[in-house]
Amino acid sequence: EKLLAGLAAGAWLLKPSWAEASAAAGAWLPEEAHELFSSGEATAPCGRGLLWLGAPRAHRLARPQRGGGVFVGQTFTLDPEVVPPPAQLRRIIEAGGGTVLEQGAPLREGAIAVVPDGADASHPLAQEATRAQASRVGPNELLGRLVGLGVASLAG
């Protein structure tokens, strides 16, 4: 969760060498030389999936243009049955500058409904999203866009 929240926030993702070198120097060193990054398509294990090693830098460098984290300006509603649990997804989304509606709040046009993975159009929140002209996404797709190759747009 902390790694995903950091990615969503556009924070530096650093190798342990940064802390070690900073401790040896007695001061915080510049991050650049210790950033966890690889150009191309290199990946590393991340929870039950993979992290594209270009994602942390892409999110960090895009932060000034977006005016905040990955989810800034986006509104979400979370189905209570999603996995990871809604409280965990809320923390990740909010770390990225997004807003999560309270359970039962009306869904707005342009919002993003996070429904259980595999839910079809008959799922109640999917139906509500269609009526409200909101997008819908499963948590695996949402988090996959956060860690995946190319770092696709999260708004749609």
Image: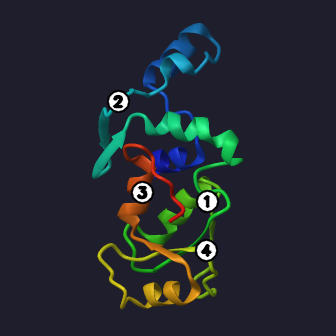
Dot 4 surroundings within 10 Å: few (below 14), some, or many (20 or more)? some
Amino acid of disc 4: Gly
Dot 1 surroundings within 10 Å: few (below 14), some, or many (20 or more)? many
Query: Mark 4 against mark 1, which lies toward the viewer?
Result: 4
Dot 3 surroundings within 10 Å: few (below 14), some, or many (20 or more)? some
Q: Quadrant of residue 141?
A: bottom left
- Estimate the spatial distance between the alpha carbons at disc 4 and disc 1, rounded to whole Å: 17 Å
- Kind of element beneath mark 1: helix
Identify the residue shown where x is 50% and y is 65%. 156
- Estimate the spatial distance between the alpha carbons at disc 2 and disc 3, rounded to whole Å: 20 Å
- Estimate the spatial distance between the alpha carbons at disc 3 and disc 4, rounded to whole Å: 19 Å
Question: Mark 3 sits on what residue?
Answer: 143
Amino acid of disc 2: Gly
Q: Is residue 143 left or right of residue 120?
A: right
- Estimate the spatial distance between the alpha carbons at disc 2 and disc 1, rounded to whole Å: 29 Å
Question: Mark 4 sits on what residue?
Answer: 110
- Residue 40: mark in rendering: 2
